[in-house]
Image: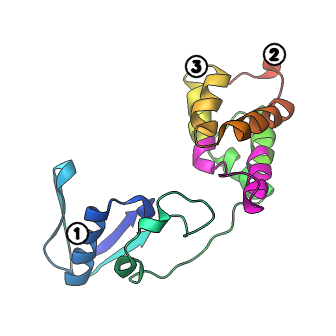
Amino acid sequence: EGGLLMLEEGTGMMPDIQLRFLSALNSHVGEFDVSYRGAAIPVHPDFVCIMTGNPPGKNYRGTDRLNSALLSRFAIVELPFPTLEEMLGYLVAIGSPEELREPLAHLAVQVWQAFDKGQVSNYVSPRELSLYLGALSSKVPDEVAFRSCVLNKFESAQRVAILQTWGMLKPSQENTSA
């Protein structure tokens, strides 16, 4: 009956997997063999695929590796980074502690703006905020959670600046019950 295949972070797909997937897209029959995982996904003639990923450029990792033949099979829809209000809505929707919502939303938007201007090498995604909040709820100490979930992809000097910004934005430890 067809169906929808959602490929998240498709721009990070290994080249051999890209070629297998392209073959499945071209033939619309058989199986999409993901041998390194030991699985085969049957291909229906009426399947539709949505692939998410980062656009080429702007220092995104792995985007230069996407096979041009595969890329040509998709319409590209560029979505803007969430506004402060949208980020706050996201943090509410995932059940983040109320006292952390505004500081995290401001941090993410500020880092995005610096990234967009080329001042930092990366940005803080909503997914990374979710990972950070999940680590906190699992009783991982705040600094360890922040460094491993948010800062790990930034260069050393940028980590220091982001940590300083976070230190100014976040509520004091006495008031945080994450």
- Image disc number at residue 174: 2
Residue 105 rendering spot, x and y as whole percentages: 76, 46
Give the main secondary structure of the magenta stretch: helix
Task: Give the amino acid at mark 3.
Answer: Lys
Residue 62 rendering spot, x and y as whole percentages: 46, 60
Of pointers 2 and 1, the one earlier in the residue sequence:
1
Of pointers 2 and 3, the one earlier in the residue sequence:
3
- Callout 3 secondary element: loop
- Image disc number at residue 139: 3
Residue 115 quadrant: bottom right
Of pointers 3 and 1, the one earlier in the residue sequence:
1
Which stretch did the figure color magenta?
A: 107-129
- Callout 1 secondary element: helix
Is residue 52 something one can see in this rendering?
Answer: no
Task: Give the amino acid at mark 2.
Answer: Glu
- Going by the image, does 30 lie left or right of 103? left
Q: Label 2 vs label 1: CA separation? A: 53 Å
